[in-house]
Amino acid sequence: MDADLALIVGLGNPGPKYEGNRHNIGFLVLDELAARVGGKFKAHKSGAEIVEGRLSGHRVVLAKPRSFMNLSGGPVASAVKFFKPTTVVVIHDELDLPFAALRMKFGGGDNGHNGLRSITKSLGTKDYHRLRFGVDRPSGRQDPADYVLKDFSTVERKQLALEIDRAADAAEALVTKGLEAAQNAFH
């Protein structure tokens, strides 16, 4: 059995009120990945809902923090401490990308994203992979914080399932083929 283990974290807010929000794209992508590994999320002592399985033969732990977005760091750090992954991937919404655009990187700043800020603070490092899913910026004067807590538009929802599937493919490529190959395939 290989020693490599990837912890794939999807960011979102818990509860039915937030399910279809732009801010919950990380949870939506993790639901697709859980279906691929044939697992159901279960509460874990880390403070996250967890699924363990394999993607293309690689061991993965999928984690949805049970805290609100701005407190995601605690459950992520607890999961890292418990599972000791060799790779950490965080899937999150990104205002500075057009809808459904995907970008992957290793490290970097939080760009005002409270979930990333919390994770970086709790882990004590910026050195983890990010899979950014574009949600676009709001038009007019709408507050970005309010915008990400709204559901995807009717037009966006028509293609959302396909884009979630593509983001899950990108996460799987990142874990199985590495950052550069995944970037080449999905940017």
Image (tube, grey):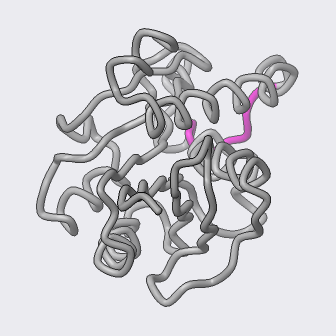
Q: What residue appears at the point 18 percent right and 35 percent down from the top-left corner?
A: 108
Residue farthest toward the bottom in the current orientation of the protein: 45
89 and 98: which is toward the camera = 89
134 vs 6: above or below:
above
Q: Is residue 135 magenta?
A: no
Magenta stretch: dominant SS? loop
Identified at 37% across, 68% down, the residue is: 76
Residue 31 point in image, percent of width and height: 72, 52
Q: Quadrant for residue 153, please give it.
A: top right
Q: Is residue 110 left or right of residue 1?
A: left
Q: Position of residue 38 (x, y in %)?
A: 79, 59
Residue name at image x 54 percent, y 16 percent = 101
Front-most of residues 38 and 79: 38
90 horizontally vs 127: left or right: right
Question: Which of these two is toward me, 93 or 52?
Answer: 52
- Identify which residue is drawn at 53% across, 13% down: 98
Residue, far left: 124
Q: Position of residue 154 (x, y in %)?
A: 85, 24
Range drawn in magenta: 147-153
**Left-right relation of 73 to 158:** left
Q: Residue furthest front?
A: 1
Q: Quadrant of residue 66?
A: bottom right
* Image: 110 above or below 13: above
